[in-house]
Image (cartoon, helix red, strand yellow):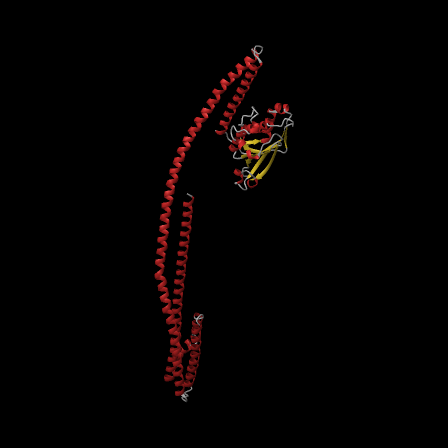
Amino acid sequence: MKFRFQYIYTAFILSFLILTVLAVLFYQRLMNTQRSSNEVEHTYEKLYLLSRVDSHLKDAIGSERGFILTRDSSLLEPLLAYSHEMFPLIDSLRLLTVNNNRQQININHLKRIVSERLNQIRTNVNKAALRENSSHNLRMLQSKVLMNDYNDALRKIEAEERRSLLFGNIMKDSYQAGNPKLLYAIFVFAAVVFVLSFLFINRELRKRLNFQEQLQQQVGSLNRANAELEQLTNTQSHHLQEPLRKIQTFTTRLLTRQNGALNEETRMLLQKINTTAEHMHGLTRDMAKYSDLISNRDTLVEVDLNYILYKVAEQMDARLTIQHASLVVKNTLPVIKAIPMQLAILFEQLIDNSLKFARRDVSPLITVAFEETVGRKISDKLLSVFGGSLFYRISVTDNGMGFSNEFAEKIFGIFEKLESQQLFLNSKGIGLAMVQRIMINHGGNVSASGIVGQGAVFNLYFPVPNR
């Protein structure tokens, strides 16, 4: 399963990268097409400006020749109108070719020739107006030479722009021809990825639905088994307690009514039978309690732990007094969301555990303390994974027999007893299992640590709701 999902993640990442590369290539080609189109438009604009300069100059030359032949001043209107427009047109042409040094040189040369030719036209017009025919042939020859230079410069500029136009059209056509193919490739690849993703998701969804259906069936079977087990446990507990009570009743009658007729060995055996029956009675009662804890259906309410601990201490006051035990609460306990009856059982079992395994030569001292902590500071494996989650830690410390930390988890098993506890007949081995079950019911956990001959510490971790 893990390998399959790694393969899926790899395929998804590769598909995403390929789509990204294709999209970037398509975008670049679009930009190149746009750039080629702009260059072609600029070339057409430059050719248009060049044609206007040529047209204006030829109109000016036509005005010159007409005026020289007819002396009609109205023919000079094109010369007067266009002579001021040609230089702005040439400057605009130079701005459009600012990135082409060769064209800049050609255009500057053209501008100089146009300027000289216009000055020549003005001189010829003035001479003609004054009817000075001297050196007319020389001026005409100079004009012809100047026009030859003009035509050469014009052809160079136009040829350069024609080559640029041809190259630009080739590039534009190339990009425009390739764009649909690349777009089609992107579409096909995206469609394939979409179809494969749909098929995979559909297959996984079917598997998930089948698994969920099987899980629901198993949960239903498990619930039925739990209900039957709970019923069986309650029935067995009830039916076992009745014979045990009769055994206790009959042994007690024998010990009281036939006490004088019984020898010492018989009296001792009857007392052992009575004690064992009482122990068995306690086991069945605790088993019923543990069964109720497993099938927990109670709702959580606001509970003051100080009040719960006070009521438990009040209930166990006689036993605390007999054993000369002290119960010390170091600081105020919090108010939490909990099940009051279960918390009473929890504290009762922890205090009972401390009293049962107290050292004979030391008066029991039980200390209850509270502090807030976070998951990363908790040594408990189950809770440390929550990292920054906040917990209430209630620690119950005693100065009893203690235990070795290698048994820190074993002591919470049901009917589990350490070797040092086997001598204690009143220890049923279910109290700490009930404590752990109660903590699980509250979304927390319990851990223990101890030192042999010095005592033990039980840490209760209750999750703190979001504030």
Q: In which quarter of the image is residue 122?
A: bottom left
Q: In which quarter of the image is the C terminus?
A: top right
Does residue 393 appear anywhere in the picture?
yes
**Frontmost residue, 252 versus 443:** 252
Report the residue at 51% width, 18% height from top.
Answer: 244
Does residue 296 appear anywhere in the picture?
no
**Where in the figure is residue 147, as x and y percent of width and height?**
39, 81
**Where in the figure is residue 327, as x and y percent of width and height?**
63, 29
Report the residue at 40% width, 67% height from top.
Answer: 39
Report the residue at 61% width, 23% height from top.
Answer: 319
Q: Quadrant of residue 454?
A: top right
Up-down relation of residue 11 to residue 277 (above or below): below
> Could you tell whether 317 is left or right of 293 in the image?
right
**Frontmost residue, 108 versus 127:** 108
Q: In which quarter of the image is the N terminus?
A: top left
Q: In which quarter of the image is residue 64?
A: bottom left
Up-down relation of residue 147 to residue 200 (above or below): below
In the image, farthest residue toward the bottom = 134
